[in-house]
Amino acid sequence: MAAVTTDIPTRRPDVIRIRHLVPVPSLPVSRVAPTVYRLRRAVAVVVVVGVVLLGWAGLGALGGALGITGTATPASHAAPVTVQVAPGDTFWSIASRIRPGGDPRPLVDRLVAAHGGAVLRAGERLAIDPG
């Protein structure tokens, strides 16, 4: 058997022993009155409510700028539109005239179902519910 010797210290250098503790004088603790706490809470509630209302108003303004409205007009209140079919008209072109900015596909489907077929004749009158 062989013995290995090293010059590594046997004590851990990361452990520091404190032999004498010096007492630290305690600092005076300031007490805050309960009315101050209530005032702080009231201010915090007002700030939070204000931020929520501003955010809500901001989203409403953003929705209005994007054309999103919170209320929809029911289909039953819209007055029916009567359209006379011109030569070369299709259900798609008629739906695009009635709803120029919207998606005409749902209106095309309703027009075909209400008309009873996919063939249009020039001079026909179609009563269309735009809702």
Image (cartoon, rainbow, N blue to C red):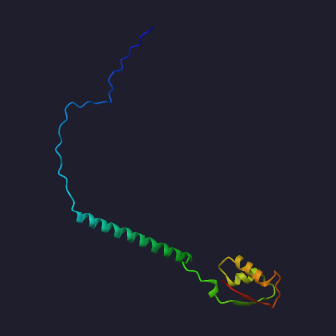
- Give the number of marks: 0
- Residue 106, image quadrant: bottom right
98 displayed left or right of 62: right
For the point 38% across and 14% down, the residue is 5
Q: Nearer the viewer, residue 88 or 21?
A: 21
Q: Position of residue 95 (x, y in %)?
A: 72, 82
**69 up-or-down from 5: above or below:** below
Q: Position of residue 32 (x, y in %)?
A: 22, 60
Residue under the image location 33 percent in, 26 percent down:
12
Q: Position of residue 3 (x, y in %)?
A: 41, 11
How far across and how far down the image is residue 55, in percent?
A: 44, 70
Instruction: Identify whether 54 is placed above or below 125.
Output: above
Q: Quadrant of residue 114?
A: bottom right
Q: Is residue 23 left or right of residue 96?
A: left
What residue appears at the point 54 percent right and 77 percent down from the top-left corner? Answer: 70
Choose top left, top right, bottom left or bottom right for residue 92.
bottom right
| Horizontal relation, residue 11 to residue 61: left or right | left
Looking at the rendered image, the quarter that the C terminus falls into is: bottom right
| 59 up-or-down from 119: above or below | above
